Amino acid sequence: MTIIDTLKSSELFGGLEADHLKKVSVLCRGGSYQPGMMVFKEGDEATEFYVLTDGRLALEMEVRPVPNRPAIPTAVEVVTEGESFGWSALIEPHVYTLSARCMTNCRVLTIKGDMLHKVMADDAGLGFELMKRLAQLIARRLVHTRLRLTSGLGLVLLGKELGASE
C-alpha cells in the first residue's frame, strides 16, 4: 500500500482532495515499534504526529489515586489501524498530554509537526479542514477520557465509603 493509500484510509486524512494528500504524503516516513515500547511519554516535547498503520497502542495518563503514592499508568484510549495520535505536535504548547505505549507490534506513519503545520499554514483550505478534523478527534477523546476517569473515580470513592463504614 502506498503512503497516499494509507492516508486515504486514515480517519484524519481520508476524504481529502488528491493534491492535499500529496502535500501530506511527502512529509511522511515509516516507523515500527515492538509491544511495550513507548512511542512518546506524557510531558515530553511534542515534535511528531502519527498515523497508526498496523497494530494497537494504548494512550495512557499518569493517575495518582492516592496522594504521596506512585502514579499509575492508566490507559484512557486504545488506538487502532487508521487512527491518528500525537496531536500535541500541532497545537501549542507542543507537549504530549498522554503517553503512547504499543500493545502489539505497531507500524506508523510519522509526520514532523512543524512541517505539517507549515503546509497547513501555506494552504488555508487544507489547514482549515485538518484543524476541523483534529478538533473533532480531540473532543471525542476528551469525552471518552472523562467518562473513563469519572467511572473509575466513582469506584474509588465508593470503595473508600464502603471501607469507612466497616
Image (cartoon, rainbow, N blue to C red):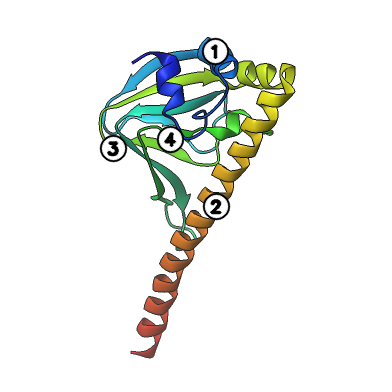
Give the Cα separation between the discs numbered 4 and 3: 15 Å
Give the Cα separation between the discs numbered 2 and 4: 15 Å
Locate residue 51 relative to residue 45 in the image: left or right: left
The residue carrying mark 1 is 22
Mark 4 / mark 1, whichever is N-terminal: 1
Residue 103: assigned label = 3
Q: Which is closer to the viewer, label 2 or label 4?
A: 4
Label 1 crowd (10 A; few <14 / some 14-19 / many >=20): some
Looking at the rendered image, the quarter that the C terminus falls into is bottom left
Mark 3 / mark 2, whichever is N-terminal: 3
Label 3 crowd (10 A; few <14 / some 14-19 / many >=20): some
The residue carrying mark 4 is 83
Q: Is residue 60 visible?
A: yes
Query: Residue 128, image x and y in percent?
Result: 70, 31
Give the Cα separation between the discs numbered 3 and 2: 21 Å
Marks 3/2 in contact by CB < 8 Å: the verdict is no
Which residue occupies 55% across, 17% down?
18
- Amino acid type at circle 2 is Leu
Residue 66: assigned label = none
Give the Cα separation between the discs numbered 1 and 2: 30 Å
Which residue occupies 35% across, 33% down?
81
Residue 142: assigned label = 2
Q: Which is closer to the viewer, label 3 or label 1?
A: 1
- Amino acid type at circle 1 is Lys
Looking at the rendered image, the quarter that the N terminus falls into is top left
Give the Cα separation between the discs numbered 4 and 1: 19 Å
Q: Which is closer to the viewer, label 1 or label 2?
A: 1
- Amino acid type at circle 3 is Met
Marks 3/1 in contact by CB < 8 Å: the verdict is no
Which corner quadrant of the image does residue 159 belong to?
Answer: bottom left
